[in-house]
Image (cartoon, coloured by chain):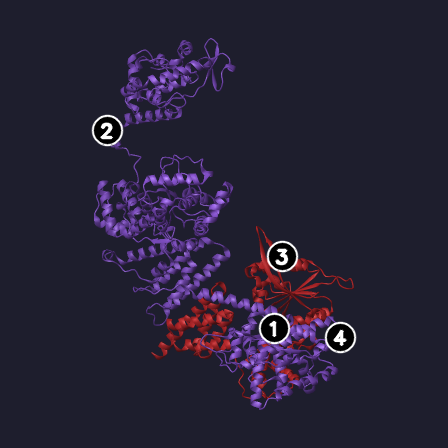
Chain colours: A red, B purple
Amino acid sequence: MLWVDKYRPKSLDKVLVHEDVAQNLKKLVTEQDCPHLLFYGPSGSGKKTLIMALLRQMFGASAEKVKVENKTWKVDAGSRTIDLELTTLSSSHHVELNPSDAGFQDRYIVQEIIKEMAKNRPIDVKGKKGFKVLVLNEVDKLSREAQHSLRRTMEKYSASCRLILCCDSSSKVTEAVRSRCLNVRISAPKEDQIVKVLEFIGKKEGLQLPPGFAARIAEKSGRSLRRAILSFETCRVQQYPFTNNQVIPPMDWEEYVSEIAADIMKEQSPKRLFQVRGKLYELLVNCIPPEVILKRLLHELLKKLDSELKHEVCHWAAYYEHSMRLGQKAIFHIEAFVAKFMSIYKGFLIATFG
Amino acid sequence: MEMDIPMPDELEWLEADLQLHEEYLDEDPEPPPLPEEEASYIEEVYEALQPEPIVKPALPIPEKVQPKKRFRPLSPNLLDPSNVDDSVEDKRCKVNDSSAIEADDDWLRYSPPPQEESVVIVEEEKETFISRYVTDIEGDFMPVTAPDGDRVYAKLVKEEKDGKLKKLDVKAPSKGLMLEPISVLLQRAEEDAIQKALQASVSSQVDANLVGTPVVNERLWVDKYSPNSFMELLSDEHTNREVLLWLKQWDTSVFGSELKSTTDDVLSALKRHSTVSQHKKVSSKNLNGWNKDSTSNNETFREDKYDHHGMQELHNKKIKDSGPPEQKILLLCGAPGLGKTTLAHVAAQHCGYRVVEINASDDRSSSTIETKILDVVQMNSVMADSRPKCLIIDEIDGALGDGKGAVDVILKMVAGDKRSDSGVENIVQTEQSGKTSSKKKKKDTPLLRPIICICNDLYAPALRPLRQVAKVLVFVQPTVNRIVSRLKYICNKEAMRTSSVALSALAEYTECDIRSCLNTLQFLNKKKEMLNVLDISSQVVGRKDASKSVFDVWKEVFQKRRLKGARKSIESSRSMFNEFDSLHSLISNCGNYDLILDGIHENILHLNYHDPVMKKTVKCLHSLEVSDIFHQYIMRTQKMSLMAYQPAIAISIHGVVSQVEKPNIQWPKSFHRYRTTLIEKVESLHMWHNKISPSISRHISTKSFVEDLVSPLLHILSPPTLKPVALHLLSEKEKKEMAHLVNTMVSYAITYKNKKIDPLPNKLKFEVATDKDTPVLSFDPPIADFVNFEGCSSNYFILGLAVKQLLCHEVENQKILQSSINRSMHGDDGKEIVKEKFSKPNRVVENDKNATKVKNPSGPTPTQQEKHTPIITVVPKSSETSTTTKKKSSSFNFFERFKKVSVNGSQLTETVKKVATSERDSRPVLFKFNEGFTNAVKRPVRMHEFFL
């Protein structure tokens, strides 16, 4: 097992990073009154971990006994029936699913399957009426229609069912859904928090950490705890005992993006743009989300840019990211951004150096 | 000459007359023709007569009567003046096809024979024609009431006249009194009246123009001047000849050899009848050599002929050799108006076929088309025109769904044909077994007649399968000169004045579409206009709505149109406008905007436009972006009407980047490729995700995997510190690391897999083989692919092959172990202990315990530890028997690899599993590994060594 999984806190008490949130959640659950919850925050901040710990707090160890089901649902959508394949993780108390897997048909998952699940009310061993928990991942990727159909479900079956929603950004969740939930913001852990965690793991593993090494990893991780722990383990595998100037291996795709950025800075021409397109395709093919590419690319470009231009370039990056969301073919938009940048940069070069 | 109502006395007279002179009545069914002056009058007469029982009993003339004296029932009304009668007679002469005199003559000449016949009839049926009782009359009748109240019933008899009698009365109406139904007559009378009134009013105003009122029944020039013979064809001569040649190749199989005399044909036909007795009902009158009689058994018959007709065997062999052409279907394609259909018709006729055409206007579902084709291919008409048929399926690409049906049927027939060629014997047998079987045989009936398919778009998806079996002929545009000369010829014939410059401009404008040229000319001729060179675009009623291929569209977008001499004079703004217009129509006709814009995106960066600050590129990409957003919006909201604005985007790009030089255009593959590989990768990721235990997989999403996890994971999975030596040679710490690594791999469901599978013997032969011969072990699932960016290699340490094999082996072991542990969870404890005894990781964990006290939930009990320590020692001992350490390691390596293979082979894991279960009894099993064929490598191995 990787350290990420090995040292994942199993209960709310053992949480190291968002202790305050964990304590609040614990109080919430112990009072037997759990509202719908919406966890949001950047990736690698510990949302999932908190949710799992919360479930354990609610249902005890039985929440960890899950089985994977890959089921095909037949949904009657008016004139035709749609076959939806959905993978769910379910214990006796809760069901986890990722409704956005269904793509543009996610509406039916929400309308039919989630409703169906929400209706069935589990009965406690003691005969008490318990409630069931549905964990929905990546709610921000749900289509607007699906989110709208979700809100009625949330109200109607609130007696028997609690929803825990999890997403990266709450801005993509409709107001209506947000207002029906208790919003829990899980911020990206601060660097000193990450250092704390890394030191904890190092102690557990019996490793000698040179001073400042953990801080370097934390700094490189971009405040993602997952990435920090992973690169910590990578360092461990690469070289032990640690030295202070040890190379922390970078993410391959980030390397690649910085290569692209260097290409762009070197030459600005349609030909170069064509090469860049090939590289962008390479990134996209490897399932890297276009938004992430664009963001990273901007980041890399800004590093090398004259401060005069930064503002304008940021503006255009935002513009093209917006149009990327409206459109469908991400490559058009990223490429358009690159072209725009080239144009700006070249104009700048000509203006300054003649 | 006014007549309002029939006089009672007239009716009385009629009544009497009916009884006395019935024979006369029928004799004159001849309606008075319609002299214009009398139209209104006759109308009146008819109204008056309608209630009367003049409905004609069909009685032939009993005796010769002079035409002039013929008694006409209307004559009393029309009345007295014989000159009126004459005039009526005259008019009839005018209107009717044959002149009155002739008719009379004919009548005189031919009357005797019908007379005799009719007399018989009269004798037989006279009594029953009119009766006072209904019961006396059989069949239809009509009541007739006399003025005095007497009622009789007149039988209605259809006139039965043979041709000769018909000639006698110039035109015998089959029913009713008149030549034409009353409604038509009324209408015509009305028209005449109006005409007359008009003429009267107009003539006062002195107008001569109306004399030349338009002739309604003018034919379209296209039809009028369509080529009727092969020599007249306008289309490219090479193509023409190809078609003709292809058709001619059918001759031997369709008509039989031309060399054959008819007597031979008769003979063979007769022979056929004698051999197959079931089909005797087919009349032997059919002397034609080919298949008057052939229903579905044509082929069979021919086969029979070959078999039994000894005399002609040699001759027939020749026929068989030169049978129908290799490709039994001809596919003609080309732009509309080039004369494909005409060529097919003319060529087929030229070769002596009767053309049967199925086009888009017919029902083209596969069932109807199948029967139709079968009809054509196998039946022959009994009618006079007994030429063999040739099927022309026009516009086969027209309707996709329906056209597909036709294509399927044809393909089936071709396929069936090929099959039947091989299995003719069987068919003959089943055919003879009875008629019922022939019905079943319907599916694979052979193709015996030429089929010509015509399409506009050769690359229509529906035609893809057909393209492979058919002979494809692509039409090229005929030269402008040829068209112009033909157009000129037609214009001369139609007395239309044109200049050849204008005609060639017209031909160019319509892209040599003869049909549209002719239609345009005819239209202009009607309008009495001259063809004007400058205004062709406004004169030609509409441009052809032909869609071009996307390649053409891209070319148009990227290429500036060169202005030719004549058009250069036109001011530039005008040409701009024209260009915009033509491009717009071009793009919107193509319709597939998504594809068009993809193509633009693909190719735009290859263009050589001058763009120092990349402004143009930015502009173009921005346009593409807009179109993408637009497209998405349209799709999401289903507002298809907004699609109309898509072409404008492409045009704006055209305005920015179009060049004079010819662009090198490529099909937009990259986006498509990106999409498919992306789907593949996501799928593989998904599969892998499902394999990982949920406690881990729930924390991994696709995004976080590629963003955060892959690169570190690869590093972690391939530690550079791991030495490629056997397990037992590792230090405690290394063993611990190894265990951790294996544990990680198992929990993430990762293993190594042979990418290139070498045959086993090979590996045994080259034991110290080079790297090229050994298989490449790579991660399975292929997670390394996710960091495999082109032109950038990931810098994670790549483990040696031996280490990979070792790891793979360990992973397999661990997996087996885990599954057995899981199973034994449900079993009793004793067994569990026995099983765990052999588990290596447990051993390692024990070591862990000793060293670092890392907690492991599945940690073994001390008793186990004691139990299995002796076993570990076995292997080192055995290997120590080898002489030197170096040799030892290599030999061990060899067996390590040997073992690897055994575990890698999936079947062998099964046996290993089995062995593992048998191990439960803790009985040491001697395992003689004898796989492969070299006996040189043979050595007793203990089972537990496999687990090391």
Q: Amino acid at mark 4?
A: Asp
Q: Nearer the viewer, mark 4 or mark 3?
A: 4
Q: Residue at x 76, y 73 (%)?
A: B828
Q: Are marks 1 and 3 on the same chain?
A: no
Please determine whether, in this image, residue B354 is positioned above or below residue B194. below
How far is mark 1 from mark 3, CA to CA?
Answer: 46 Å
Chain identifier of the residue bearing label 4 in the image: B
Which amino acid type corresponds to the residue marked 2 in the rendered image? Val
Q: From where the camera sits, is residue B310 visible?
A: yes
Q: Which residue is mark 3?
A: A112
Residue where numbered disc 2 is placed: B206
| Secondary element at image label 1 | helix
Q: Considering only order in the chain, which callout, 4 or 2, is on the residue closer to the N terminus?
A: 2
**What residue does disc 1 label?**
B908
Q: Are marks 1 and 2 in contact (CB under 8 Å)?
A: no
Amino acid, disc 1: Leu
